[in-house]
Every structure is written in C-alpha cells, then in structure tokens.
Amino acid sequence: MQALLDSIARMSVPTDATRIFHGRGGLHPGSEHFSLDAFPPVLVLTSFAELSEDDVARIGAALRQRWADIAPGETLHWVLQIRLVGGQGRTQLMSGSVPEPHVVTEAGARYAVHVLRGQNHGLFLDMAAGRDWVRSHIAAHANGQDDFRVLNLFAYTCAFSVAALQAGATQVLNMDMSKGALAIGQQNHRLNGLDKRASFLAHDIFSSWGKITRGGPYQLIIVDPPSYQKGSFVATKDYARLLRRLPELLTPGGHALLCLNAPELPPDFIHDLMAAEAPAMHRVERVTNPPVFADRDDNRSLKVLVYRT
C-alpha cells in the first residue's frame, strides 16, 4: 500500500469534493484496491478488499500525521468503507464526525452527500470533467437563446442538472427510477437556488417515451446509466434502445453526452451502436477524465462521449 501512503504524505487540505488517490486505475501496483476521496471536511477511504487491523492502523496513522502537518489543531474526520464482491461490505466512522446535513462543493455548486450509508455517496467524483463539459457547452451555446432544454436520463442526484442550470439552461427534465435519489436531487437544486427550472420524474425511462417526447425537443441530452443494474439497465442489452431514440428527441445541431462506466466495454462499443442505431448522429469528441483518474488502459476507464445531430 506504499503508493497510497505516499499520496497521503503529499495531500493538501481539500476544499472541493475530489479524489485524492485512485488505485483502481492500475497505475500503482499493490494499491489497486484503494481509493481515497475528500468530501470536506471528511476523508473517505474505500478498499475493494478486506484489510487487516495492522493495515488500517498504518493508514490511520498516516492520515493523522499528515493532518497534523497541514491542519494543525483541527480534528481529522475520516471514514473507512470496505466494498466486496456481491455488494457485501461495511462503512465505519474511524475518527471525528460527519456533518448532518453534509454539503460539499464542486466548481461553485453545492451538493448533499451521505458517506455513512450505502456504497454510493450522492456525487460521482469521476464525472467532474463531464459536468465541466456541460457547463462550458451550455455557456457557449445557450447565450441569447430563449429556450435551451436539457434531458438528464439516469439523473441519480441530478448533479448534471445543477451544472446545466448554473450555466444557463432554461429547463432540465431529470428522470430516474429512484425516488430517493431524485429527492436528493431536488435538495441539490434548492441548495443552489435552481428549483424553479427543473422537473423530476421517477419513472422507468423505457416506458416513459411519451412524457420524454412531450418535454422536448432538447438541445442537450445526457445519458449516464449504470453499466449493469438488474431490473433497470444492462448496457450490453439496453444502450442500443436509448441511442435509437436520440435523433427524434434532439433539435437540429443538438448534442448528446453519452457516459459508460464499464471497464470491459471500450469506446467502440458506443461508436458501433451509434453507427447502427443512429447513423445521423456524428461523433464530436471524448471528454478527458480528470487527471487523478488516470488509468493504465484508456479503454477501461470511464467513457464520456459527445455526439451531435
């Protein structure tokens, strides 16, 4: 775990929510099962393998030493999450406390998070560059337009929607099957004073095309599904069903931001599906992931792909 300990020794006091160490990218042999995230004022260490008491003690000592150096006199707040195959694991507060409510910032936006319950914390840090792209794209294209509509599919807690509205979108439709996730999404909009221009539908996307169509056409569609979630979405089976709908939902010149977080599926998985299901859509670019999420194999890392009509 030396690479993790070295990263802790170089750590500065985080202000925004961010990843500090990304072992999952495979660039740090021996530390592949670790990630260290900052959800200020809390640090969250995730291990995708069981840890011995000695390992936990070494990590805890490294965090305490570094925190004493960079934040003298301040309490260290840190959480350990063990995530194992099959959804097994545990989450434990190791030091300090977790605010309630717990609100973090990213690029000027505020988001509610929950680091002590569930495996996901309410904000996917690896999608920070995708949210940056949305902000930049809308700021460049919505200026002067009376109507710039965004469709946010698999919205989860609606971080994309917050970014879009802050950048100048006039309306965002957020759709996700999880009422709980959308409730946090509504809270995120209230935290940023944006609740007037967003709508939220807790529906199965594949049985809601009528509602989706009536809300359009859209200048931007964001598709950020789980790669495999039984009963909801399986990328190898369901992504094609989404892509073939894009041309009829987008305005001429409209864009789609397509996300895929499946290491076993390369970018060509999406490119080939688009050529078959929506040949009128043209590839624009692949959004570069944040540097901290560097991966030994770019085909395995998060794919964030832009297409336009």
Image (cartoon, rainbow, N blue to C red):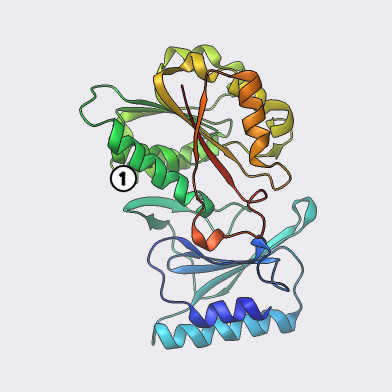
Rendered location of residue 269, percent (x, y):
68, 34
Residue at 65% over, 85% down? 58
Rendered location of residue 20, percent (x, y):
52, 68
**Quarter the N terminus occupies:** bottom right
**Res. 33 image quadrant:** bottom right
Q: Which residue is mark 1?
A: 192
In-front residue for pair 283/230: 283
Amino acid type at mark 1:
Asn
Crowd class of label 1 (few under 14; some 14 to 19; many from 20; radius 10 Å): some
Rendered location of residue 203, percent (x, y):
56, 24
Q: Left of 229 or right of it: where is 134?
A: left
Residue at 55% over, 31% down? 176
In-front residue for pair 123/133: 133
Residue at 39% over, 62% down? 16
Residue at 52% over, 11% down? 210
Rendered location of residue 293, percent (x, y):
56, 59
**Res. 200 image quadrant:** top left
